[in-house]
Amino acid sequence: MRPGRMKSVMADQCIYPGPHGDMSDEHYLPAALGRFRGCEPLEGRVCRPCNTYIGDTVETEFLRTGAIAFFRWMVGVSGRDGLLPSPFYRRAAGMPPIHMTGRAPGFAYDLLWEVDPSTQDVYPLRQIVFEHQLLAEPRAVPIHDRMRDNPEALVELLRDWGLGRGQPIRVFATPEEIPWVTDLLRSLGYAILPAGPLPSSRPRRSSSSQR
Ligand SMILES: [Zn+2]
C-alpha cells in the first residue's frame, strides 16, 4: 500500500543518518515478536547497514531485556535465530538478566524465581543465599551462566550488593549444577559446610529450558 506519487518523491531515502548502503526491506514490527497478519515490510525507507545497526542495538535491547524478554520467554516466541537463551540467566545488550523475587511459604527471606516456558510454572532460579551481619535478613544472589567460567562476575555482583563479606547459607541448583556451583564458591574461598554440599531444593528443569 504505497501511492506511486509518494514513491517518486521519497523512495530510496534512508530515514537514518547513515552511513548508508543498499536499500533493504524493513520489518517495522520485529519478526521476533511473532507474525502479524497483514503486516507488509516497509520498502525504500531504510538501507541495509542502518537496518543492521538498529537491529543489533535498539532492537536487541528492546526484544531481549525487561518485560518484552520476559513475555517472549514465557509464551515461547522465537526469533529468526530460534528460541532465546533464558533471560533469567543471560545478559543482553549490556543489561543484566531479569530478577524476579518472591517469598515462598516457610521462608523468612525472598528467593529469586524463573518461569519454565514449557509449563509456565515458576521455579527457584539457580541462586545462593547469603547472610551478612549488616543485613536484617538473608539475600538471594543469582548465579548467572557467565559466572561458571568467570567467578569474578559473582565477586563483582556480591560487591555491588554489599555482600562482599557475606556467608553462603543455602544453594538452589539442579543436581547437575550443584558440583560447579559448589566449585564456584570454593574457588572464591568460601567454606562449604562440612556436612557436604549445601542443601538444595531446586527442582530439575524440564529439558526445554536447559540451554
Ligand atoms: Zn541508512
Image (spheres, rainbow, N blue to C red):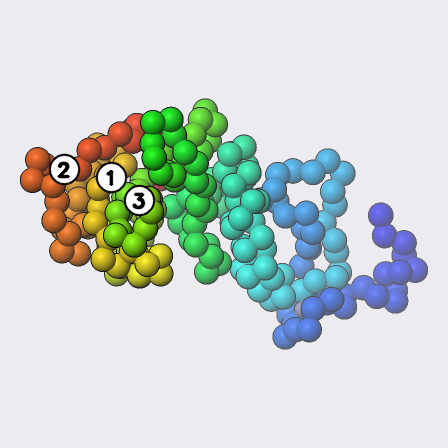
The reply to whether callout 1 and callout 2 are in contact (CB within 8 Å) is yes
Mark 2: which secondary structure? loop
How many C-alpha atoms fall within 10 Å of the one at disc 2: few (<14), some, or many (≥20)?
Answer: some
Coordinates of residue 170 in the picture (x, y in percent) = 23, 39
State whether residue 135 is above or below residue 106: below
- Residue 24 occupies quadrant: bottom right
Q: Which mark is residue 197?
A: 2
How many C-alpha atoms fall within 10 Å of the one at disc 3: few (<14), some, or many (≥20)?
Answer: many
| Drawn side of residue 42 relative to residue 115, left or right | right
Marks 1 and 2, Cα distance to the nearest angstrom? 9 Å
Please identify, in this view, whether the residue under mark 2 or under mark 3 is nearer the observer: 3
Can you name the residue that lies furthest to the right here?
5
Coordinates of residue 97 in the picture (x, y in percent) = 43, 49
Marks 3 and 1, Cα distance to the nearest angstrom? 12 Å
Residue at 30% across, 28% down: 203
Q: Which of marks 3 and 1 is nearer the N terminus?
A: 3
| Drawn side of residue 56 relative to residue 123, left or right | right
Residue at 27% across, 44% down: 128
Q: Can residue 78 be seen in this view?
A: no
Q: Name the residue tied to disc 3.
A: 138
* Amino acid marked by disc 3: Pro
The reply to whether callout 3 and callout 1 are in contact (CB within 8 Å) is no
Instruction: Note whether ligand 1 is within 8 Å of mark 1.
Output: no
Please identify, in this view, whether the residue under mark 3 or under mark 1 is nearer the observer: 3
| Drawn side of residue 37 relative to residue 110, left or right | right
State whether residue 55 is above or below residue 19: above
| Drawn side of residue 9 relative to residue 27, left or right | right
* Amino acid marked by disc 2: Pro
Q: Name the residue tied to disc 1.
A: 171
- Residue 169 occupies quadrant: top left
